[in-house]
Amino acid sequence: MPSDVEYSPVGEGLGMRDYWLYVWLRRAAVIAAHVTGLGLTLIISLLSRPGTSEWTDGCWETHPADQNTSLFSWHPVCMSVAYCLCMTEGILLFSAEGSPFCFKSRKCKVRLHWFCQALVLIAAATGLGFMLASKNVSELPHLVTWHSWLGISTLAATVLQAACGICLIFPKLLRLSSSPLRLKLYHATCGLLVYLLATVTVVSAMFSDWFQATVKGVAWWGFLLLPLFPALVVMNQITNAYLPRKKITS
């Protein structure tokens, strides 16, 4: 079946030396994105101290072992696992450079992608549950910050994107008129928008009272920039794979 979307080749029009430099730079960027996503998740988990303390009135309050542990402290852990780790890995595994799954077949990558996205939904829903429970216990109002509204929007967009993925897997069963290639293009484009929305949500969390009280000074600025790097790598990967080829005439 002829393709209605032509994919742009990587490194087209470059000399051999420039091509290899381009490939190695892309490979280093993808590896750095893997490390950044994993590192950010681990650091946020350590800063949150899940199950050992409660954020109350602008300070950390440590609970004895025989008392109920914190509910809020699990929220940043679950959300970082969902979006900084699982969603990032679920997209980067399709990268040809620097991905630990580059030797796997396309079918295997799709299955791993679905597994990662399922973990995203589970971890995000769990993190939302901990936040709601923490607000209810503390008798605090819901949806009063930009971060909370962005978080709800990101979670809703993630659910819709998962539904789009189901349409991509079962187009005949759902009697969709669009071609599979066009559905893949829509799915990838919407997935990029969801990832960028998730990145904005993660960045907004760093302006919260909890994070600014936990991380200060130069380290805070470093954390503010960290989520942006994987987002740039993901955006570059998707645009290189799905951007229609343009003929260049000299």
Image (spheres, rainbow, N blue to C red):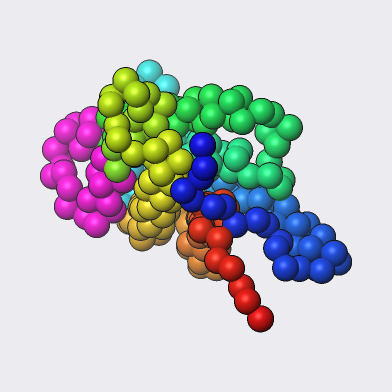
Q: Is residue 139 magenta?
A: yes
Residue at 35% over, 27% down: 171
Q: Residue 18, how many percent across, how many down?
A: 80, 68
Answer yes or no: is residue 127 visible.
Answer: no
Residue at 57% over, 52% down: 7
Left or right of 112? Residue 79 is: left
User: From the image, which quarter does the C terminus lie in?
Assistant: bottom right
Q: Is residue 73 magenta?
A: no
Answer yes or no: is residue 7 visible.
Answer: yes
47 relative to 23, above or below: above
Left or right of 25? Residue 190 is: left
Q: Residue furthest right?
A: 17
Left or right of 35? Residue 73 is: left
Residue at 32% over, 20% down: 173
Q: Residue 108, how many percent across, how many down?
A: 61, 25
Counting labels gives: 0
194 relative to 177, above or below: below
- Helix, strand or loop for the magenta stretch, by majority: helix
Residue at 55% over, 66% down: 246
Q: Residue 243, how many percent across, how many down?
A: 51, 58
197 relative to 80, above or below: below
222 relative to 109, above or below: below
Bounds of the magenta span?
Answer: 132-156
Q: Residue 55, how many percent across, how many down?
A: 33, 43
Q: Residue furthest front?
A: 1
Front residue of 75/2: it is 2
Front residue of 9/114: it is 9
Left or right of 31? Residue 137 is: left
